[in-house]
Structure formats: structure tokens, C-alpha cells
Image (cartoon, rainbow, N blue to C red):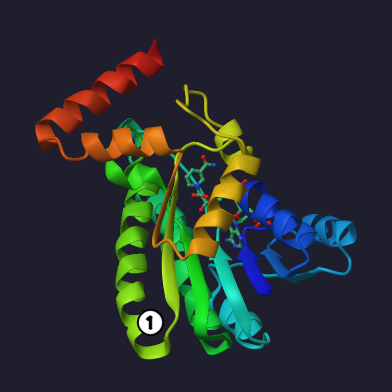
Amino acid sequence: MRILITGATSGIGFQLAKDYAKQGHQVIACGRRQQALNELQQQFPEQIQTLAFDISDRAQAVDVLSQQAEIDIAILSAGVCEYLDVSKFDAAMFERVFGVNVFGTMNTVEGLLPVLKKGSKLAIVGSLARLLPFTKAEAYGGSKAAMHYITRALDVDLGEQYGIQVLAISPGFVKTPMTDANDFEMPMRVSVEFASETIRKGIDKGKRDICFPRTFSALLKLMSLLPQGAQVALSRRMARNQQG
Ligand SMILES: NC(=O)c1ccc[n+]([C@@H]2O[C@H](COP(=O)([O-])OP(=O)(O)OC[C@H]3O[C@@H](n4cnc5c(N)ncnc54)[C@H](OP(=O)(O)O)[C@@H]3O)[C@@H](O)[C@H]2O)c1
């Protein structure tokens, strides 16, 4: 199969690229850092091709992606995380985070549509952060909540018109450079190998809602059913515990 992965220079996307290549698939690995892409390609010269572009640059993303040959699976893992300090409220930070996680992902979808065919799968990496109002996560969680809605609506429309299946991937904490930068406790954080295996199995089965790890996901889903006041109280308590 031909599998295109964004965010393939690091973390979840990097592991997915290596694992699919090991299985003998043709992988088109995307990211901005050419050096990291070259190193990945050198590990699997027969399996991996690379594409260096910035997903937040619409013209570049659409141009590069729409010229590809047909793709069986596209996994959109490129993303960024920044946390908000409300005492220094910074609207530009929302632009940066939404610019990559939402608008950059949509640029990628626009570029990919001509090269996805009937039966192709488009898997978009969101986050379980979409489920609760976590402290400092206004921009990151907001971008992932928006992406989850967009992913589900795209599943309705792209499935109907083109036969493309759209899958939502919602990880909990995964050990990657993104979470290595966090200075708070991350409950039930899983390895990137586990994340890759769970995502690949979910995509194989055509699961529309790939959430992991299971217990963490079930807990957050239950908490998201509580009244809003209880969710806020819980989130504040977690924030206080993080501060020690
Ligand atoms: N790690 C977790 O616990 C966790 C949990 C839930 C959801 N997620 C989501 O999973 C995805 C992958 O996260 P990760 O932990 O693997 O992060 P990571 O290690 O920081 O990797 C992020 C990837 O995104 C790419 N990227 C960022 N901005 C880009 C841009 N403007 N254009 C093109 N590529 C860009 C980076 O490539 P370059 O630097 O080469 O551009 C890198 O390959 C993200 O969408 C993240 O929100 C992660």
C-alpha cells in the first residue's frame, strides 16, 4: 500500500513511518525538517520517499500533495502544542496553534483530495484533550475539539461523495518530544511503539474512533458526561495537584 504520513520527522508519525516501512509498505514521509527526513529515508531506502513542506503554507501544501500518485492511507499527525498563561493572554498563540492543527490540517486535506481514491482511508490525529476543559489547554484542546468535529463531518461528506473513509485518532499521553517538554504528571502515558501499533490496528479495521489507552479514554469519556460545573471543579483540582 502507499501510505502518506505528515509529522513523520518526530514522535507518533516517525514511529508509524518506520513500522509501515518495516511491513514493506511504500511510505511518503512528510515534515519540515529535511535533515530528519533524510535520516529516516536512509534507514529504509526502498520503502520511504520524503516530502518537505510546511502544512501551514496552503499553496505549498496543496501544490506538493496534489502531484502525488494515488494514496491508500493518509495519516495526518503533524501538530503543535502550546499552553496558555491567562495572566499573559496571547491571542497570537491561538493563531499559531490553530494555524497548524486546524488550518494546516485542512490545507493537507485539500492537497490530498485529488490523490485519494474510492476505498482510501484518511486518518486524522486529534487528542483525548478534546473531551475536557484542561488547564492551560485553551488553544491546544480547542484546536483538537475543532478537528474532531471536522473529522466526523468529513467522514459524512467524503464517504458519501467519494467513498473515502475518514477516521478520528484520539491519543491520550504518548511519550514523544511533544510530551517530553511537559513539566506536569501525565497519567497512563504510553510508549510511541504502543501508539503506533494501536493506530495501525485501528486503521486496518476501519475503526472510525481510535481512542487509547483504553482505561484513560474511558475515564475521560465518563468525566465528559458530568455536569459542566463538576468538570470545571475536577479540572481545577487536577491543576492544583499538578502544582503540588
Ligand atoms: N504525544 C502525545 O501525548 C499526544 C497526545 C495526543 C495527541 N497528540 C497529537 O499527535 C500528533 C503527533 O504528536 P507527537 O507527540 O508525535 O509530536 P512531535 O513529536 O512534536 O511531532 C510533531 C510533528 O509535527 C510536525 N509539524 C509540526 N508543525 C508542522 C508544520 N507547520 N508543517 C509540517 N509539519 C509540522 C513536526 O515536523 P517538523 O518539525 O519536521 O516540521 C513533527 O514531525 C500531534 O497532532 C499531536 O497533537 C500527541
Q: Residue at x 31, y 21 (%)?
A: 238
| Side of 214 where 122 appears, left or right | right
Q: Which amino acid lies under the numbered mark 1 shown in the image of this protein?
A: Leu
Which quadrant holds the N terminus?
A: bottom right
Q: Residue at x 48, y 81 (%)?
A: 110
Depicted 148 relative to depicted 122: above or below: above
Q: Residue at x 82, y 68 (%)?
A: 47
| Side of 18 where 141 appears, left or right | left
SS at circle 1: helix
Q: Residue at x 74, y 69 (%)?
A: 25
* Mark 1 close to ligand 1, CB under 8 Å: no
Question: Is residue 83 something that shows in the picture?
Answer: yes
When asked about the image quadrant of residue 168, the answer is bottom left
Depicted 85 relative to depicted 15: above or below: above
Which quadrant holds the C terminus?
A: top left
Q: Position of residue 124 (x, y in %)?
A: 47, 62
Question: Is residue 90 something that shows in the picture?
Answer: no
When asked about the image quadrant of residue 134, the answer is top left
Question: What residue is pinned by disc 1?
Answer: 158
| Side of 156 where 102 appears, left or right | right
Q: Nearer the viewer, residue 119 or 240?
A: 119
Q: Position of residue 236 (x, y in %)?
A: 25, 24
Q: Position of residue 199 (x, y in %)?
A: 54, 53
Q: Position of residue 18 (x, y in %)?
A: 75, 55
- Residue at the extreme front of the image, as rendered: 205
